[in-house]
């Protein structure tokens, strides 16, 4: 961790009708850390990701990426700045191959000009080769290289989750948001995923923000953890501190941590 702020949330709120889904949340995520977000069902975790990625507008407050105000930025601009995510409900192109899904994730890196593309210039060919190499590398990392020609929809569930991560990484993000990446996995798969996230974080120099229900996974993986309850931030700190926080034990963990 370098200690520099990557994401800064100031009094971020989102209401749905009368419901305060996210309620004046202020926090800073530092460069290079693995930051966990936990909380009971309906605590506002996914809504917070939707606000960070511009999928829904804030009701009030501000979000900054490094020094840049993101508060009203559209999703494509946020993605282009280097913030990528996966979804709680897997959102792959199921009728496309594993390879095509990752290549589509690289979309913003196809930066060469329209005419250059049309004429297939050497610069275009070189860029395409570079992107294909990167896609290959990602598929190796996620253990999906042998599956590259299969339809995404035909992969077993755990591999679909990993493909989502590969596709998010194809954007070459600085910040990777993972929404319950281990949902539906057995304990051994969860442990393996946890180790994989840690290695990816190291290898690609990522800042990772992870929403996860499985408390041991979050405790092992994360440098710091934020706990949400009814949209409010009720605790923030290193795993040990959060685990022993009476508010957390009372509101969420019920003493079984
Ligand atoms: N588009 C929406 N319209 C109305 N209410 C919504 C909408 N999205 C979320 N909510 C509500 O906001 C609250 C927070 O939901 P959110 O999905 O962010 O919680 P969560 O912590 O991610 O929960 P879970 O762990 O179950 O995924 C819930 O009460 C939810 O019903």
Image (cartoon, grey):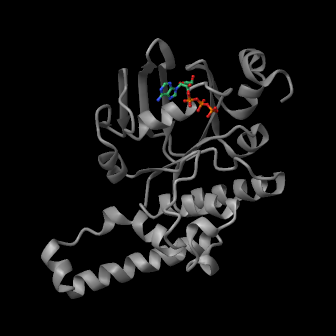
Q: Residue at x 73, y 49 (%)?
A: 184
Coordinates of residue 34 in the picture (x, y in percent)? 60, 45
Q: For the point 31% across and 78% down, which residue is it?
A: 127
The reply to whether residue 7 is visible in this rendering is: no
Say whether residue 45 is left or right of residue 68: right
Question: Where on the image, by quarter, is ligand 1?
Answer: top right
Could you say where residue 54 lies in the image, as x and y percent from the top left?
Answer: 37, 38
**Quarter location, residue 117:** bottom left
Using the image as rendered, state which of residue 212 and residue 33 is in the foreground.
212
Q: Is residue 102 left or right of residue 82?
A: right
Q: Is residue 149 above or below residue 95?
A: below
Extreme-left residue of the structure: 115
**Which quadrant holds residue 203?**
bottom right
Which quadrant holds residue 11?
A: top left
Q: Position of residue 208 (x, y in %)?
A: 55, 47
The single residue placed furthest to the front in the displayed view is 95
Where is residue 8? Give x, y as percent: 42, 32
Is any atom of residue 172 visible in this view? yes
**The C terminus lies in which quarter of the figure?**
top right
Farthest residue toward the bottom?
Answer: 122
Work out whether 147 lies above or below 71.
below
Residue farthest along the right direction in this orientation: 256
């Amino acid at each position: 961790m370098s200690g520099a702020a990557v994401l800064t949330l100031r009094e971020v709120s989102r209401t749905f009708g009368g419901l305060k889904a996210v309620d004046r949340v202020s926090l800073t995520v530092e460069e290079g850390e693995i930051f966990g977000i936990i909380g009971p069902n309906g605590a506002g975790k996914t809504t917070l990701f939707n606000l960070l990625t511009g999928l829904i507008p804030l009701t009030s407050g501000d979000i900054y990426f490094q020094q840049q105000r993101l508060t009203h930025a559209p999703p494509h601009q946020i993605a282009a700045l280097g913030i990528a995510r996966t979804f709680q409900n897997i959102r792959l192109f199921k009728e496309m191959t594993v390879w095509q899904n990752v290549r589509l994730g690289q979309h913003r890196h196809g930066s060469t000009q329209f005419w250059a593309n049309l004429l297939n210039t050497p610069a275009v060919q070189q860029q395409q080769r570079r992107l294909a190499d990167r896609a290959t590398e990602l598929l190796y990392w996620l253990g999906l290289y042998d599956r590259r020609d299969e339809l995404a929809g035909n992969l077993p569930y755990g591999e679909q989750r990993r493909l989502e991560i590969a596709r998010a990484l194809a954007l070459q993000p600085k910040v990777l948001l993972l929404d319950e990446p281990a949902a539906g996995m057995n304990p051994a798969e969860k442990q393996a995923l946890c180790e994989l996230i840690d290695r990816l974080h190291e290898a690609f120099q990522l800042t990772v923000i992870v929403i996860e229900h499985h408390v041991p996974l979050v405790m092992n993986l994360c440098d710091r953890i934020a706990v949400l309850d009814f949209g409010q931030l009720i605790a923030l700190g290193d795993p040990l501190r959060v685990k022993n926080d009476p508010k957390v034990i009372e509101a969420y963990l019920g003493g079984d941590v």
